[in-house]
Image (cartoon, rainbow, N blue to C red):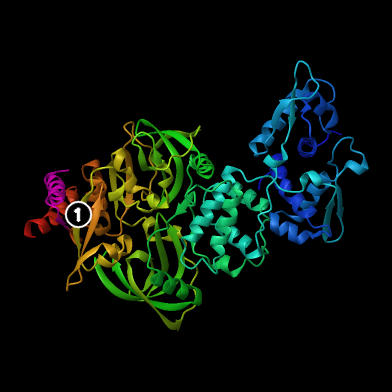
Amino acid sequence: MAGAPRATDRLRRLLSMVPFIAAHPEGVSITEICTRFGISETQLLRDLEVVMMVGVYPYTPDSLIEVFVDDDTATIRLADYFARPLQLTPAEGLALSAGLAALAAVPGAEIDGVVTRTVEKLTGLLGERSTTGSHPIDVDLGVVAGDVFDAVDGARRDQTRVEIDYYSVDSDERTTRTIEPAQLWNVGGYWYVSGFCHRAGETRVFRLDRIAEAHGTTETFSRTPDLLEEDLAFTDPDLPRVRLRVAARSAWLFDGLSVETLPPGPDGSVEVVLAVVSRRWLEPLLVQAGRDVEILEIDERLGTATIIADTAARVLARYDTA
Amino acid sequence: MAIPRLERLLNLTAALLDTSVPLTAEQIRHRVDGYEKTGDAFGRQFERDKDALREMGVPITVRPAPETDPPVSGYLIVPTEYYLPDPGFTGDELAVLHLAGRMVGFDETGTSSGLWKLGGNPSSEGEASSQEQDAPITSLPGDPNLAVVFAAATSQGSVRFTYHGKERTVHRPALGFRRGHWYLVGWDTASQQPRTFRFDRIDGIVDPVDSPEPTATEVTVSRSSLGSLEPWTLGLEPVVRATVRFDATVAPTVLHEVGSSTVSARHPDGSVEITLDVTNRDGFLAWVLGHLDHALVLAPPEMVDLVVGRLRTLSEGVR
């Protein structure tokens, strides 16, 4: 952190730290205080030096907070007015409740009901529950079959290979592949796993809701360097690009997909640039946006400016023959 | 040597907590260590300090000081408004809170300071618990209006905001996160029924408003309203029961999304027919079209006509 911490930031932490230390009459280890409150030993000692000058009128020794620091322990006495921390602010309550709701949506996070118990206690701190007894905040991280998640996550933790039955959008077919799962994450309401794919011969990213079945094996593998989201294929400069203008009301379809950030036009329309691995990934987006999208530029490897009309005609053919 | 501002802020907080009667500004000036006893600086110092404390959530109450005539403003902190009751979190519950904190991609300050109030991080930084290290990664996005709606959600309150150009007042809101977006669900006074709103389509700021006593019908707004956030249900059109056939390549994925209870027929080639209650035609259309030639709308005729009509328009367009 650049520069000295501000007085208000130090105050915010001290209003929680002083009650914690004072609640242990025999003292708390310096190491434990530093770990719990994310503070260096130097900063802690500086803060405690300030605390020992704090008190109430008339600031005689018997009305100042008592702070003792020896080799490895800090003790605080005579701080009754700081006996408990400040109430949670709505912003703090929101952050913690949202985090717990997200955790509750991760398959396997609930062990012996610990997440539910924690949510109950936190909700009790935040004020009255709604009359229906339901929670004020609910997070859904996306659909995934519990057994698929367990098999893939289990394989990731154990570093064993897993066999998946996967629908690939690019090739538009369902195939069986053996992968070595490395990293598991969630974004935009979908779960993704990255890992070495034996069929492709390289590291790939898979969306868990496209896995119909997953079966663990006993074959172990050694973990390759973790693949970060940012390394993924869609930032590859060699990938074919398409440049679109999208009307405001359909802009949400392209949320988070553009590899360039451009300011919206005066009518609220947005220009997006997509890096596309295959045409079949692009087609649904274009058809869904329909007349709200205009193709400004398209790489010839992806198609021509008539791509929307061509795709629509192909889908229409199913209805004509049905 | 001037007393550091941190010390003065701590002294002020201590004085306001310790007193049982409101203290006037003059009393604070002379009884709280750290303020200029003479000169003009005190007024500015005191105002800045009060603002800083209030911004942190410290509740400073203003009341007439006793034995003043005419009445002079006095300041104190009411203990029940300040102190956080001990929630009694066990070690494993604190660990869960810490793990939960890592799932939040917005408001790092609020997450940290909230955790400090609850006892801080119980595990050593050097050896993060194996659960934390191995945890799947997710990072919830934020929205400027989340906090005010959350406050209303936990206090049985109401909110007012502008949505698609119209002003709406919603009672007893609740928050939902689906498919990467935040939604507000609550009793919409304009339409007199539960409605769902997307946060990123709210124009400007959400304001808290006074809330009347909940009526019996309002109270039935529960989590089940939050549950169905599928695009074809986000509307108030008369219900239409639609049947769609999906081929074998996409059927498993679709069934994960809508649940197998919607299946009305299964075919030997692996394709399935599902039946859905649609109250938002545009949402239904977008969802079906997203599956391109793997989806075929079978019934009712008006829905088939809708899809065919849209496809025909697009296939004739020249761009």
> Residue most toward the bottom?
A218
Q: Secondary structure beneath disc 1?
A: strand
Q: Residue furthest right?
A: A61
Q: Quadrant of residue A150?
A: bottom left
At x 65%, y 67%, the residue is B127
Looking at the image, which is closer to me, B226 or A313?
B226
Q: Is residue A69 left or right of residue A200?
A: right
Classify A128 as above or below A269.
Answer: below
Which of the image's four quarters has the C terminus of chain B? top left
Residue A232 position, x and y percent, is 41, 60
Pointer 1 residue = B242
Chain to which mark 1 belongs: B
Magenta run includes residue B315 = yes
Residue at the far front: name it.
Answer: B216
What secondary structure do most residues of the magenta stretch adopt?
Answer: helix
Find out whether residue A141 is within the magenta segment.
no
Write the start and end of the magenta stretch as one range. B297-319
